[in-house]
Image: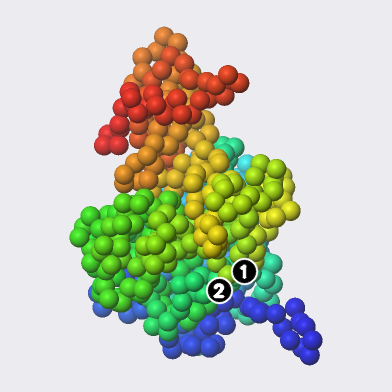
Amino acid sequence: MTGPAGATEWPTRDLLAHRAATTPERTALIDADADEGDAGATWTYAEFDRRVDRTAAALEAADVAEDRLGVLVGTRPAFGTVFFAAMRLGLTVVPLNVRETTAELASKVDRTELEAIVCERETETTALDIAGTTDGRRLPVLSVDDPAAEPETDADVRFLETTADGDSSSPSVDPVPLERDHTQLLMFTSGTSGQPKIVRLTVGNLVASATASAFRLGVDRDDRWLCCLPMYHMGGLAPVVRSTLYGTTAVIQREFDARETARVMDEYDVTGVSIVPTMCKRLLDADWEPPESLRFVLLGGAPASSELLERCLEADVPVHPTYGMTETASQVATATPAAVREHEGTVGQPLVNTDVAIVDEDGDPVPAGEPGELVVSGPTVTPGYLDADRTDEAFGDRGLHTGDVGYRDDDGRLWILNRRSDRIVTGGENVDPGEVVAALREYPAVEDAAVVGLEDPEWSERVAALVVPAAETEPDVDTLLAHCDAHLAGFKKPKTVGFADSLPRTASGTVDREATRKRLLEGGIDVTER
């Protein structure tokens, strides 16, 4: 897109191509879990660019050069390589949750109409299982690792060479012209209807989000942002995208572990990290002392308790509580440690160029201090969901209706009170109660069920189910949980189970959720350790 006198709207190609042309010698990625002495543990932007080029060429060779690419890969540098290779080719990336069951993933493959699936060694079997679609097509499966040794699978999986450095003779591709309104990501988020919503995020959304975050958190030339959240969530992918835009370094740890994560932060002079409250609590419980290099701890994914924030301040943790969502490519508002100290519970003012309205049930703005629904607008906000009907339901004249209830003070600081929906947030993962109810009802010994979130000191909330057994059956927690193992990801399984002759209901016939919570708190069986 060109303007007056030949001016061109930026970016014109993938973000990594721009960065590698600008600062090729700077460190792009550090693999904190690579073997000691491994030459591939640290990549410059030039090396990162060559790997992406090689991967893009391999995707082209596999006839994957348009539409949507599913990525069933955990948190590791290869995820970033595949992401930018897709951007280079103009593909839309669809991150798939490696923790979900085959049935859950197969539904997402069909809904997004993928062209191919990229997996790793650990997810290869699942990728092959979900490669068949409802219309009879068989999707190609490509692995970032050498395929598994079993002969029956070797022929079905193609090796995608994402880790080889490459040289001047390596295959390369010309980056496609990039438009800011190109849908770069399709990400899943839980709603209240029992089926995850599919959020469209454009190149412009990602750039706007990175820019707004930089104005709030600041950017230093020597910044090192630790990524230890799953990359199939925006909070895990954002540090890699943002660091590439800034020309700083992303340090990638494949899985959070309190002591190991503390060691990585210290060893690699990490300056920033994105984590959820449960992770922060575990770090503090492990007697973590933040390194002098640490500038910010972006705390999101779930509300942080006052107790946790007080512990952070006492331990000199530079905590930045954040309110954000997938639909806004991450942050909406972020508080500084100073704001946390002076205004307990706030998530701070909205980021630059992000407008937040607090409205009543009629959509009219409410005065400062009065609660209402948060409506968000600005360049970070998704243009809509993949399902047009859901887009129409969620957007109004003022922007995206979040379904979250909160208020603002006279200086524009936001407080989030609760979710208008019944969504459960456990350890930073969103759980739709309707999906869990549907899985429970599939079990022959269950007549009905209600699912709610109960307050949990470690996970913020835990999934709890009140179950009505079918006639002439005996309730059995163990067999019920075994059924859940086959139908639900681990974080979605009930951690507290109660039984009742009937579900408590309101006068209108809907489930009385508060009464359900009370019954579970009084007579529920905690099954976390089973």
Vertically, is 324 above or below 389?
below
| Distance Cα–Cα, label 2 vs label 1 | 10 Å
Q: Which type of secondary structure does the marked residue at label 2 adopt?
A: helix
Q: Residue 287 sits in which quadrant? A: bottom left
Vertically, is 446 above or below 415?
above
Q: Which residue is mark 1?
A: 353
What amino acid type is highlighted by mark number 2? Thr
Seen at 77% across and 83% down, the residue is 3
Vertically, is 147 above or below 502?
below
**Count of marks, rendered view:** 2
Can residue 115 be seen in the rendering of this structure?
A: no
- Residue 419, position in %: x, y? 52, 44
What amino acid type is highlighted by mark number 1? Asn
Seen at 51% across and 25% down, the residue is 512
- Viewer-proximal residue among 525 and 352: 352
Left-right relation of 291 to 30: left
- Residue 425, position in %: x, y? 44, 45
Q: Which residue is mark 2?
A: 211
Seen at 39% across and 62% down, the residue is 342
Q: Given this view, does label 2 or label 1 mark the residue nearer the observer?
A: 1
Q: Is mark 2 in CB contact (under 8 Å) with mark 1?
A: yes
